Image (cartoon, rainbow, N blue to C red):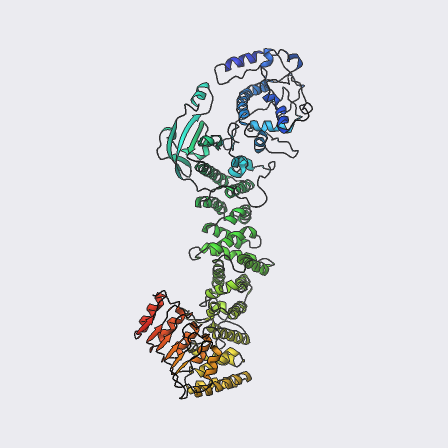
Amino acid sequence: MPSYSQEIIDLNSNERSEYKNTKESKSDEVKYATTDLTNSVPEGLNADQKLKFALRDFLSPTNPVLEDSVKDDPAPSILEQKLPFIDEQVDTDDAAQSDEEQQQCRETDEVLNNAACRLRRWRAASRKLRRPRIIDNLSTKDEGGYATKNFNGGHTDLADRLRSLAAAGSMSASAGELLSLAPPPPAATAPPSPGCLLSPTLADQSSAEYFGSSPECCADTSSFESSSSAGAPVPPPGPRYKLAKEGTLRVCCFQHTRTVVDKILAAKFLRRWETHVFCLLEEHIVSKTPSGLLERPMSYSCMQEVYCISRWDPARKYCLRIVMPNGSLLLQANDAYTRDQWYYSIIWKRNMIRYRNFLTKTVRKEVVLKELKNMVDFAMTTPLQDESVTRAPLQILTDLLSENKDSADWEEWAENVTSAAAPLLAERCVNGELCALLARLCRRRPRAAPLPALAPPVRRVLTRNVDFGKAPDARRFVRDYISALSAHNSGPALVRRFVTVTHGERAACPHPRAAPNLAAVALAALDDHYRGSALPHRCDDAEHDVLCFADILEHMCEYEDWVVVVGAVLQPVPLCAGALACARVAARLGGVLRALARDPRCSAHVSVAPACAARPSPPSWLRAAAPSDPALVLPHQQLCELWGSMIGALLNCCCKRKSFLQSMSKQLPDFLLVALTEHPAALEALCLMLEWEIASGEQIQLEIIAALQGTELGQKYYKDLCERQQNLQKLQAEGGPRRLALPVRATDADVAALLEAGALGNLECLSLAFTSVTSACAHHLIKLPSLRYLNLWATKFGDSGVQLIAEHLPRLQVLNLCETPVSDKGIEALSGLSSLRRLNLNSTKLSAEAFEILRRRLPQLQEYDIRYTEAW
């Protein structure tokens, strides 16, 4: 820097030639003394004062490095000598300089004079923004702790020079300490200008977090520290923005200051502002009114620097500066939020174009991987939240994986790319093309695929996907990922762990789509493998790749909230005959069916019953596991136990009805085979067929009786049936009252005791209003065939009891269900009561649709009460 007696010359002015001629005419050599700045620092100074003392060559009006011979009255020849720099040490004993060095120093003078002007502006701005923090943000540290860089003809900013001097106070300044300054590369990201005060959110973050590193920096980044903390990168705290696409901004353009005329024209009083409607396109920025300052589009690749000018915010001038090669543009918004939105949007467009061009055109793979990591960090830390922001990085990743798919080393390249993009895959939904590429990687190298990097996108597909029919590549990706897990030595444990992680640690899975999607993937994999296979089936080693999907169905049944989902997916039977004929698959499906049969919830075990839209063969799991002709290949004893468990679960819940047993009458041989194994459910079903007269024909009744008497437990069931029939004959004998009303405290046990007391063959009217009876007493009420009037007002009589009454009391004419918990499920069963004339459904769960159906099926219904219901 020049001393107090040196004149700052504008080398662009007319005096430049004079200055150069005068300087070249001097031949005297001047030596600068080497001084130790560290030893002369006074004690008791704080950090800022020490920095100021270290920078006294730049900030003070004197130059302490001159020799004693020229201290008092320096000669004009000395004043015109080359100015000392502080970044490079040269041997001071070399007094003579070559012609090449003199020419290099002459080229440096222009940069020095411009740096002096910039330093003056910076000193004024540093009162509000501490200089050490600015310098720290614009420099890096080497291994020794000194903030230095290896400059090989590259660009060096003034802040880096000042930081070097502040950290290395013992560095000497001599006449030979000259460093040539080359202009910055066009694609490099320049630091903010010292004359501009950054906003706090931008000043506290390094440029790599927002802009990413330039392509030139990817070759060697070992000397730079990582600015991000451990773990996945996250956006900075603060507001979030949509990607700006169109908006109205004020624009001002001024040229870079080179001459006095340009400086005058760039003054704030002479700036001309225009209002334009900006549109951010893929390659450039255009104005909807192309005139004036924005007559031509602005390309993102020509932007050297983009930053916010926060020092104007107190005056409500929210400006954004775009530095171009020939000048700068000031964009003014109405508020700070709009200004920041446009700032981040322009930065996003600019960097995405640079990343796309660099990643798709670079040949060196290690360089591409480093720049890919930078792109991932940039995409993860941007405060923009938009669909295009999510889609652009994934499309670049897809293009990288799509290149050279037929090459021999594609698998290794895909592994490295996937590992580098793991944070992006963990936070973004992958598209169909990318799913196909990742699935291809899992198929080709299942034991070497980067499974930890692929786990988040797989879980995201399972928890977010709605219809695999529209996304077959996503289903294939999940399927191949599970196969890759199973291919490892600890495959079964990994598959179980995968199901556990997908469900979560809570009692209920927080993702309602996870269970049906996972079950759909497993069933599709089993069906695809076994469809078209020859029967009888022969097991081979190729089945090991699909057995993990049968294990997934079995593992899913370990979670209470997923059992219902698995049952719904398995109804009707979704597998082909080849899959059911495989013994290893059948053993795992048997565990699934046992879990469904053990579940007390009706929505779970009803899935084993025949469905309304069942396939012709097999129509239901009861038919597929039928012991007489099984499609599910299991040992006979296991089949009988499984089939009896399913029948018992249905009879103990909502299927203990005449209609269900009538539908199962075609499977009477299965009931007989299971009854011979003394299974209680089959014995109870056979007794109900005799009691409710479902088994028509003397021959069929004799077969049932023979099966019941064939075992010791069956004989006990048959004995109880005979006793019930004798009591029923006594109960239905003529006699007894015609009307009967039980007290308020009556329960189901009182109803059972009443019916066992004597003959009630004449009972036509029974009132159980305001009692504590439930649907359990329906099994006793159906023994009164002469019943015409039944009052169940304010009882706990539910749907199952109403269904039994509708099947066994066809003569019922008046029914009162006011204030009972019946719903549409039980009310729709009343359509079978052809003699019903009066019906009270006041304050029930009746819907309008169910009531319309009931009215169409009961045209003889004369009176009904539907007040305080949805149908009212």
Using the image as rendered, state which of residue 753 and residue 274 is in the foreground: 753
Using the image as rendered, state which of residue 539 and residue 765 is in the foreground: 765
Q: Quadrant of the N terminus?
A: top right
Q: Is residue 486 visible?
A: no
Residue 598, percent across and down? 53, 70
Residue 92, percent across and down? 66, 20
Q: Is residue 96 above or below residue 704?
A: above
Q: Is residue 416 visible?
A: yes
Using the image as rendered, state which of residue 249 and residue 188 is in the foreground: 249
Using the image as rendered, state which of residue 817 and residue 498 is in the foreground: 817
Q: Is residue 321 above or below residue 371?
A: above
Res 57 → quadrant: top right
Residue 390, percent across and down? 46, 45
Q: Is residue 215 above or below residue 162?
A: below
Residue 123, percent across and down? 55, 25
Name the residue rendered at 47%, 81% in the picture: 752
Q: Quadrant of the C terminus?
A: bottom left
Q: How many numbered circles does the render carry?
A: 0
Res 832 → quadrant: bottom left
